[in-house]
Amino acid sequence: MYATLSYDVNAGPERIEDVRRAILDLFEDRLTCDLLSDTFICGIVNTADYLAMVKKLRRIGTDFQDQFEFVFTLHRTGDPLRSNAAYSKAKARKIIDPGDE
Protein backbone atom coordinates (compact mmCIF):
# COMPACT_ATOMS: atom_id res chain seq x y z
CA MET A 1 0.00 0.00 0.00
CA TYR A 2 1.01 3.58 -0.41
CA ALA A 3 -0.44 6.95 0.47
CA THR A 4 -0.44 10.40 -1.06
CA LEU A 5 -0.02 13.37 1.26
CA SER A 6 -0.94 16.86 0.11
CA TYR A 7 -0.68 19.61 2.65
CA ASP A 8 -0.82 23.36 3.19
CA VAL A 9 1.27 25.24 5.71
CA ASN A 10 -0.03 28.67 6.64
CA ALA A 11 1.57 31.63 8.38
CA GLY A 12 0.73 31.95 12.04
CA PRO A 13 2.28 32.18 15.47
CA GLU A 14 4.75 29.34 14.80
CA ARG A 15 7.46 29.53 12.17
CA ILE A 16 6.53 27.85 8.88
CA GLU A 17 9.87 26.02 8.97
CA ASP A 18 8.88 24.46 12.32
CA VAL A 19 5.58 23.21 10.92
CA ARG A 20 7.28 21.73 7.87
CA ARG A 21 9.96 20.13 10.04
CA ALA A 22 7.26 18.41 12.16
CA ILE A 23 5.71 16.97 8.99
CA LEU A 24 8.99 15.80 7.48
CA ASP A 25 10.17 14.31 10.79
CA LEU A 26 7.05 12.15 10.85
CA PHE A 27 8.07 10.58 7.54
CA GLU A 28 11.85 10.41 8.05
CA ASP A 29 11.91 6.60 8.39
CA ARG A 30 9.75 5.99 5.32
CA LEU A 31 10.63 5.91 1.66
CA THR A 32 9.02 8.98 0.10
CA CYS A 33 8.87 10.47 -3.37
CA ASP A 34 8.12 14.17 -3.84
CA LEU A 35 5.55 15.10 -6.46
CA LEU A 36 5.50 18.82 -5.61
CA SER A 37 6.97 20.85 -2.77
CA ASP A 38 3.89 20.10 -0.67
CA THR A 39 2.82 16.72 -2.07
CA PHE A 40 4.50 13.32 -1.86
CA ILE A 41 3.83 9.61 -1.72
CA CYS A 42 5.06 7.17 0.92
CA GLY A 43 4.92 3.49 1.67
CA ILE A 44 2.21 2.20 4.05
CA VAL A 45 2.35 -1.25 5.66
CA ASN A 46 -1.38 -1.84 6.25
CA THR A 47 -4.61 -0.09 7.24
CA ALA A 48 -3.56 0.14 10.89
CA ASP A 49 -0.32 1.86 9.82
CA TYR A 50 -2.31 4.29 7.67
CA LEU A 51 -4.69 5.11 10.52
CA ALA A 52 -1.76 5.62 12.91
CA MET A 53 -0.22 8.08 10.45
CA VAL A 54 -3.52 9.94 10.12
CA LYS A 55 -3.63 10.26 13.90
CA LYS A 56 -0.08 11.65 13.96
CA LEU A 57 -0.87 14.10 11.16
CA ARG A 58 -3.95 15.29 13.06
CA ARG A 59 -1.74 15.79 16.11
CA ILE A 60 0.48 18.09 14.05
CA GLY A 61 -2.68 19.98 13.07
CA THR A 62 -3.54 20.35 16.75
CA ASP A 63 0.00 21.36 17.71
CA PHE A 64 0.09 23.99 14.96
CA GLN A 65 -3.50 25.25 15.15
CA ASP A 66 -4.74 26.79 11.88
CA GLN A 67 -1.30 26.41 10.28
CA PHE A 68 -1.49 22.86 8.88
CA GLU A 69 -4.15 21.23 6.71
CA PHE A 70 -3.75 17.96 4.87
CA VAL A 71 -5.28 15.27 2.69
CA PHE A 72 -3.79 11.79 3.18
CA THR A 73 -5.14 9.25 0.69
CA LEU A 74 -4.54 5.49 0.86
CA HIS A 75 -3.94 3.48 -2.33
CA ARG A 76 -3.66 -0.26 -2.92
CA THR A 77 -0.27 -1.70 -3.82
CA GLY A 78 0.21 -1.47 -7.57
CA ASP A 79 -2.53 1.10 -8.13
CA PRO A 80 -1.26 3.52 -10.76
CA LEU A 81 -0.09 6.97 -9.73
CA ARG A 82 -1.78 9.51 -11.93
CA SER A 83 0.07 12.79 -11.66
CA ASN A 84 1.29 15.41 -14.07
CA ALA A 85 4.18 16.26 -11.71
CA ALA A 86 7.80 15.67 -12.64
CA TYR A 87 9.03 13.04 -10.18
CA SER A 88 11.41 10.10 -9.94
CA LYS A 89 9.55 7.26 -11.62
CA ALA A 90 12.00 4.65 -10.27
CA LYS A 91 11.65 5.88 -6.69
CA ALA A 92 7.86 6.05 -7.01
CA ARG A 93 7.74 2.51 -8.42
CA LYS A 94 9.59 1.22 -5.31
CA ILE A 95 6.81 2.72 -3.16
CA ILE A 96 3.82 1.86 -5.35
CA ASP A 97 4.76 -1.74 -6.07
CA PRO A 98 7.62 -2.88 -3.84
CA GLY A 99 7.31 -6.48 -5.03
CA ASP A 100 8.29 -5.45 -8.57
CA GLU A 101 12.02 -5.44 -7.83
Image: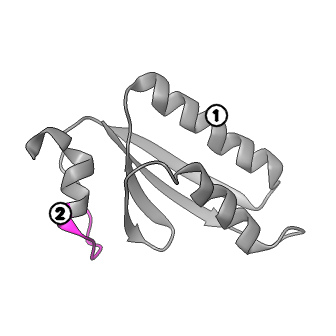
Q: Quadrant of the N terminus?
A: top left
Q: Residue shown at 70%/58% (left/top)?
A: 68
Distance from the alpha carbon under mark 1 to that under mark 2: 29 Å
Q: Is residue 77 above or below residue 39?
A: above
Mark 1 or mark 2: name the one nearer the start of the chain: 1
Amino acid type at circle 2 is Ala
**Which span of residues is magenta-colored?**
82-90
Task: Give whichever of 69, 42 is nearer the camera.
Answer: 42
Residue at disc 1, secondary structure: helix
Look at the numbered disc 2 and give the secondary structure of its residue: helix
Q: Which residue is mark 1?
A: 55
Q: Is residue 68 left or right of residue 30?
A: right
Query: Across the whole image, how many numbered discs are drawn on residues?
Result: 2
Residue at screen point 85% across, 68% down: 14
Is 67 or 95 nearer to us in this picture? 95
Which of the 4 image quarters holds residue 39?
Answer: bottom left
Residue 87 placement (x, y as % from top left)? 27, 72
Residue located farthest toward the left when viewing the structure as drawn: 100
Residue 35 coordinates in the image, percent (x, y) = 36, 68
Q: Is residue 52 visible?
A: yes
In this picture, is 69 found above or below 17? above
Q: Is residue 42 magenta?
A: no
